[in-house]
Every structure is written in C-alpha cells, then in structure tokens.
Amino acid sequence: MIYLYVIIGFIVLIFSIAFFRFLFIKDKTLVDAKPVDLALAKNYAEEFAELIKIKTISFKETENNQLPFIKLKEKLRELFPNVFKTMKVKNFLGEAVLLHWEGKNKDKPIVLMSHLDTVEADEDSWEHKAFSGEIIGDEIYGRGTLDTKSTVYAFYKACEELIKSGYVPDQDIYLFSSTDEEISGLGAKKAVDYLKDNNVKPFLVLDEGGAIVTNALPTVKKPLAMVGILEKGYANIKFSAKSLGGHSSTPPKNTPIARLAKFINDVETKFPLKTKMIKEVEDIFKNAAPYMKGINRFLFTNLWLFRPLITNMLPKISPYGRALLSTTIAFTMIKGSDEENVIPANAYVIANIRTHPIQNVESSFKVLEKIASKYNLESEIISSREASPMTLTDSKAYKYLEENISKVFPDVKTSPYVMLGGTDCRFFNEISEGALRFSPIRMDNSELKKMHGKDESIKINTLVEAVDFYQEIIKNIGGIK
C-alpha cells in the first residue's frame, strides 16, 4: 500500500509543479512599441509605391522578360542616388543585382537581401489594382508589398540615409536582389558563386522568411519575430500504375486508378513518416508559451512533461503542427485516361513532399516506395533538394539579429522558425554559417494570408520600423567580438 501512496504522491507533485509553472510563467512585460513618425511613414509609402507600380513577374531566360526589371532598377537609381554613387554594382543574367558598400574592415561582412520578382496577380479579383501601389488610410496595396519589395525598399532606404549623413560602415555591406526567386531560379546562386570567387564569407546573411507576426500561434496575441533558421527540403515523386488498358464496359479489378487510390488512402490514413520535436521547434513553443492562454499555456509551458503527448497529438489536429514535426506529403496531380470510357494503360499521381531534417529525401522516398510496391506501383523521384543546413540559435549571427530586433521592436519576442517553403537564402548557406530568414515587417495572420493572394498589402508604419532596423543592423556590427 505504501508504494501506491508514493506513486500517487509523485503524480500529485509532478502536476503541482506543472500547475505552478502555468500560473507563474507568463508574460510579465508591458513594453509598448516605439512611436512612429506618421509623416515620415507617408513619405516612405509614396516612394515605395513607385516600386509596386512596376510589374516585375519572375524573370525567365526562355521568355527574355527582363525589361520590367531594367525599369525597376532605373527607379531604384532615381530613389536612392547615393547608394548607386557609393556602392559597386554587379549585375547578373536576368537583372539580378549585387551592390557592395566598402567598409573599414572585411572580417564580418553582412549581406542584406530580398527578391525583386513577384508572382502573377489575377487582377480581376482584386478590390485594389494589383500594381497600383494604392495608399488607403494606413495601408498600401499591391503585389509585392509583402513579398518582398518592402524589405528591398527598406534596406536601400536605410543605406541611402546613412550615406547621405556621411556614415562609413565598420564592415563591408552587400545588398542583393534576385529576379527569379518565386520560380526557384538560379539568380542567387550566381551571386554566391561570385562572392565565393572573391573569398567573401558573410558573418550574417539576412533574407526574407519569417516576419513580426501577431497571432502567429493559437491564443498568442503578442507579436513574435519569427526568424527562419532552416528551410525544409522539397521533392516531387511520381507513382505510376500500369495495365493492359481496355474498355470501361468490362473493367477488371485493380485498375491503375483503383490501385493509386488505395495507395493514396493508405498514406493519408496511416501517416508513415517519422515524427519528432527537434530542439529548434521546441524553442518556438517555449518562447511562445508565456503568451498563450488557458490549456495551451498549461501544456506548452510544461513541455518537460507533455512533450510526448504534444508530439503525438499536434500533427493530428493541425496541418502546421504536422509540418513542424515531420516531412509532409501532399498528393497534388493525377493523370489517367484521356477518354472517359477507356481504362488507362498508364496512370500516375504526383506527391509533393517537404522534407524535415529528421528524414531526408532518400529516406522519405524509400518509405513511400515500399508502400507503393504493395499496390504494384512504380516510384520515381522527379526533382528534389534537401533541407538547408541549420543556423544555430546560439550562433553569434542569431544572437546579433535577436539583439537588434529587441532594440527596434521592444514589444516583440524573438523566436526561431522552421521555413516550410524555399528562399534564395539556401544558396548562401554555402558561404555563411549565419544565413537567417527574417523580414522586419509587422503583420498579423490575416495579412499573412494575402501573400500570393488578392489585395496583398502592408501597413505603411512598418516601413519606418524596417528602415530603422536595417540601420541598426549596419551600425552595430562594429561591436561584435
């Protein structure tokens, strides 16, 4: 009986500790955001609108469509004359551009980057014209406001003002923008090859990726600066089913489409890949937990106790949770017969997978290939790239970024972030251990959903904060030991 009492006492103690943490580990800071000069915000927005008005759909070498980017770069020269007078300019195929601002020292160069191209816009569905740069109240509308001409404008403007004031940076500063990021092009790779040939090893590379997001996680009202420390991998896998074909009036069992359907159902209902909460994902939840409410705060402030439960349940109730903890699988394309009354001799389905660091492309493929073989399907990797190397949260580059975020955004908590999509930054992992993905732009989930959608917009106040942020990044680098 005494053993039972010991066990009960231990359980009571454990849950008492968990409840104590729930009550006392919470947001105790009441810091407000810095006030923004509204007149300056309006001035910035009017300049920024000039970039939005230029329709720069991704450069494709086969289409020879670089003229809008030439026009955009002419506008950049007009808006930021001191930048182009001071910095060395290197152009690449498709009008990708790298600028070099020479500093007093060379040991900790910084690359500030974001792409110039945008995705297409279905302009008939927009309430505000997609390439108008229309300013209404405190919002500026247009394709590229979020993704990502706002950051391009901000770091150019930051440099323009510093140069105009006579400032000379302590370290070399590079500004880079590709014109084919949205189609996973190679403009950024050309820039990396150029920097590598010139023995440039950046201390910090700062590309788009995470942002300052309100309501980033359930019940979290505090804005979180989400810093991307890695990008998940990417692969397209083709699963093919063959048969003798035939007429649909006398169908045999297990036709190609039937076998593909069984395979898809098997994968969808019995998720076959690894699930694990790595430290970097755990850090996301630890940083956000004090700002959560109710049961969420109870669970996430006590990961030491509830990690197995959360790891098991989160992927089942949240697609985002699945993406953070596993390689994901999405069946996106299927092809059968070209005629409604013909059984296909060959049918296939395409699965797009986003690979997690815990399970790479080859390992994920082998798992799916084995399942596909049960249904007499052939498997083939069509295209792939592995997850990017991870930039550690205890690295000097991450700590430097975190310090400067807190200076400009005192009301914001910084958190690491796993990028579910791809950016140009992955190429820079080759030459830098400080490749990070963060745009100093405030937004909430409703604005985030406009990215690549209709009526994309940002608040004009955030441009002022973004310019301040890039100036701090440039000015404070001399203090790094």
Image (cartoon, rainbow, N blue to C red):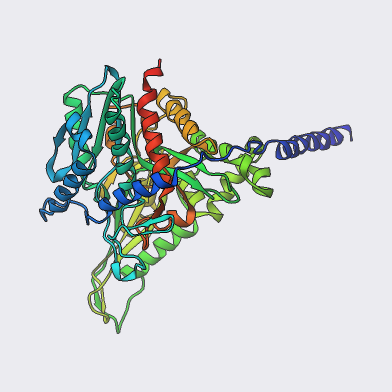
Please tell me which residue is depicted at 34% across the width and 56% down the height of the picture: 351
Comparing 98 with 393, the one in front is 98
Name the one closer to the observer, 353 or 46.
46
Q: Is residue 278 above or below residue 204?
A: below
Q: Nearer the viewer, residue 19 or 458?
A: 458
Can residue 87 be seen here? no
Residue 90 lies in quadrant: top left
Q: Quadrant of the N terminus?
A: top right
As drawn, 194 above or below 213: above
Quadrant containing the C terminus is top left
Q: Position of residue 30 (x, y in %)?
A: 63, 38
- What's the residue at 30%, 42% (across, down)? 152
Q: Say if 302 sits above or below 130 in the image.
A: above
Residue 379 shows in this picture: yes
Name the image quarter holding residue 435: top left
Number of marks present in the image shown = 0
Rendered residue at 59%/50% (across/down): 313
The residue at 37%/38% (across/down) is 467
Farthest-out residue, front: 39
